């Protein structure tokens, strides 16, 4: 199915809103991942040595922002080119980071659900099914690229 201009705009607009409170939404995003899959806790270096989700952890924030930005970038590419192109080096790096930390295919569904919940939280009344579908579609394409890379590495 094709990715429309409207969908691209929805993704961009919602990121503009969430971007205004990175500390809040990166923490929410991460907390949702752990709420859905508590066992994922052990995969993240910034949690291994603590019992609670660290507030204001620079690494957590930076990584969470990257997930949002890369999904946004994927939406733009889907609309412009009809396909997703992630720089080879980036993909190889992300493939190896996730493989090394024990990430499995099923975890990608967990992160998608956490991302959707974070959008819901951040957008409030502006949240709707159309927004959710646009993000989900872009995320699925990006996730597939990373999963494919992870399989080529082992
Ligand atoms: C690290 C993106 C899915 C778990 C990272 C990093 C990025 C990223 C940018 C930081 C790499 C670095 O600079 O070191 C993404 C994207 C995803 C995705 C775009 C999906 C489209 C997942 C999933 C899991 C996961 C499904 C499993 C729950 C991790 C872990 C790290 C990581 C454990 C290492 C964090 C650390 O300890 O430093 N991810 N990720 N990611 N990601 Fe993901
Ligand atoms: C890394 N990969 C996927 C999702 C994340 C969310 C928060 C922090 C780091 C992440």
Image (cartoon, grey):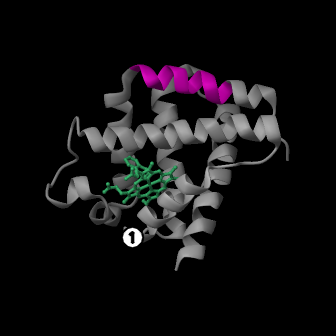
> What kind of secondary structure does the magenta stretch mostly adopt?
helix
The residue that appears at 29% across and 61% down in the rendered structure is 41
Q: Which residue lies furthest to the bottom in this view?
A: 154
Q: Looking at the picture, does residue 70 appear above or below residue 50?
A: above
In this rendering, the answer to whether 131 lies above or below 63 is: above
Residue lying at the far right of the rendered structure: 1
**Image position, residue 74 (x, y; %):** 66, 41
* Residue 93 picture location, percent across and down: 48, 59
The quadrant of the rendered image in which ligand 1 is seen is bottom left
Q: In this view, does 64 lie to the left or right of 11?
A: left
Q: Which residue is depicted at the point 14% across and 59% down?
A: 49
Q: Mark 1 points at which residue?
A: 100
Q: Is residue 3 shown to the viewer in this render? A: no
The residue depicted at 55 percent of the width and 55 percent of the height is 89
Asked if the beta carbon under badge 1 is closer than 8 A to the nearest atom of ligand 1, the reply is no
Which quadrant of the figure has residue 54? Answer: top left
Query: Residue 133: x, y in percent?
Result: 69, 40
Callout 1 crowding tier (Cα within 10 Å): few <14, some 14–19, many ≥20: few
Q: In this view, does 56 lie to the left or right of 8?
A: left
Q: Nearer the viewer, residue 84 or 18?
A: 84
Residue at horizontal 37%, vertical 28%?
Answer: 22
Query: Does 83 lie within the magenta span?
Result: no
- Residue 17, can we see it? yes
Secondary structure type for disc 1: helix
Residue 17 among those drawn in magenta: yes
Q: Is residue 138 left or right of residue 150?
A: right
Count all numbered tags in the image, as a single digit.
1
Q: Where is residue 36 in the image (x, y as percent from the top left)?
A: 41, 56
Highlighted magenta segment, given as a residue range: 10-20
Which residue is farthest front? 89
Q: In this view, does 141 lie above or below 9?
A: below
């Amino acid at each position: 199915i094709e990715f429309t201009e409207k969908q691209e705009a929805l993704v961009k607009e919602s990121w503009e809103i969430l971007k205004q409170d990175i500390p809040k939404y990166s923490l929410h995003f991460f907390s949702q991942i752990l709420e859905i899959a508590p066992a994922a806790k052990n995969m993240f270096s910034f949690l291994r040595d603590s019992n609670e989700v660290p507030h204001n952890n620079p690494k957590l924030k930076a990584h969470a922002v990257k997930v949002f930005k890369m999904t946004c970038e994927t939406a733009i590419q889907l609309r412009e080119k009809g396909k997703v192109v992630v720089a080879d080096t980036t993909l190889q790096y992300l493939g190896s980071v996730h493989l090394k930390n024990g990430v499995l295919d099923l975890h990608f569904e967990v992160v998608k659900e956490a991302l959707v919940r974070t959008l819901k939280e951040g957008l409030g009344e502006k949240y709707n099914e159309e927004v959710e579908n646009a993000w989900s579609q872009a995320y699925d394409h990006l996730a597939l690229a990373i999963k494919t890379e992870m399989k080529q590495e082992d």
